Amino acid sequence: MTVIRVKSTAEVFDVYRIRYQASVIGQGIPQESEFDEQFGQTYPYLLIRNEQAPIATARLNFTNKAYAKIERVAVSPKFQGHGFGRQLIEAAEEWILELGFKKIVITSQLSAVEFYRSLGYQIGTLISDNAEIQTVYTEKQLV
């Protein structure tokens, strides 16, 4: 498996393919809600892939000076439960540390709270309980 800091259009295509499979098809999230990027903008993404297929992705957000945010975490349904989510978050944390951030925020789906807790994230308050999917604020202080 290879973790890639996305740089090419083909890699962005793989990112969107995973997000479409995992979120739109897998969870029934409306396409217009899942794909919230601004047209023409570039975003920092991580992508895990093997020789045959893209496996997992996450978007990073470095716009806030006080913390970095990990967003749009998705693992292709056929690869879920095999540790790729953990590998993805660890790679994101490494990138975030390289940039000098000391705090990470993730707006997690309620169903993923235990996963993030196992990675050292503190679980905060319920953000939204009337959206398509309930979300919870989580954060982690880095060394």
Image: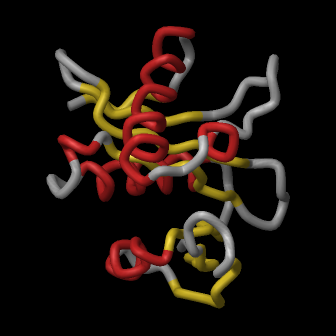
Colour mapping used in the image: secondary structure
The residue nearer to you, when weighing 73 against 66, is 73
Instruction: Describe residue 73's horizontal placement relative to residue 83 as left or right.
Output: right
Residue 56 location (% of width, % of height) = 35, 39
Quarter of the image with the N terminus in it: top left
Q: Is residue 141 visible?
A: no
**Could you tell me how many numbered marks the image carries?**
0
Instruction: Describe residue 76's horizontal placement relative to residue 89 as left or right.
Output: left
Residue 25 location (% of width, % of height) = 41, 41
Residue 45, by quadrant, is top right
The residue nearer to you, when weighing 75 against 65, is 75
Q: Is residue 119 above or below residue 17?
A: below
Q: Is residue 37 visible?
A: yes
Residue 15 location (% of width, % of height) = 47, 28
Q: Is residue 50 above or below residue 97?
A: above
Residue 87 location (% of width, % of height) = 30, 51
Quarter of the image with the C terminus in it: bottom right
What residue sits 70% from the left and 48% below the top?
61
The residue nearer to you, when weighing 101 against 88, is 88
What residue sits 84% from the left and 59% below the top?
65
Q: Is residue 1 above or below residue 131?
A: above
What residue sits 46% from the left and 46% below the top?
23
What residue sits 47% from the left and 50% below the top?
28
Q: Is residue 60 above or below residue 110?
A: above
Residue 126, by quadrant, is bottom right
Instruction: Describe residue 66's horizontal placement relative to residue 45 as left or right.
Output: right
The residue nearer to you, when weighing 73 against 120, is 73
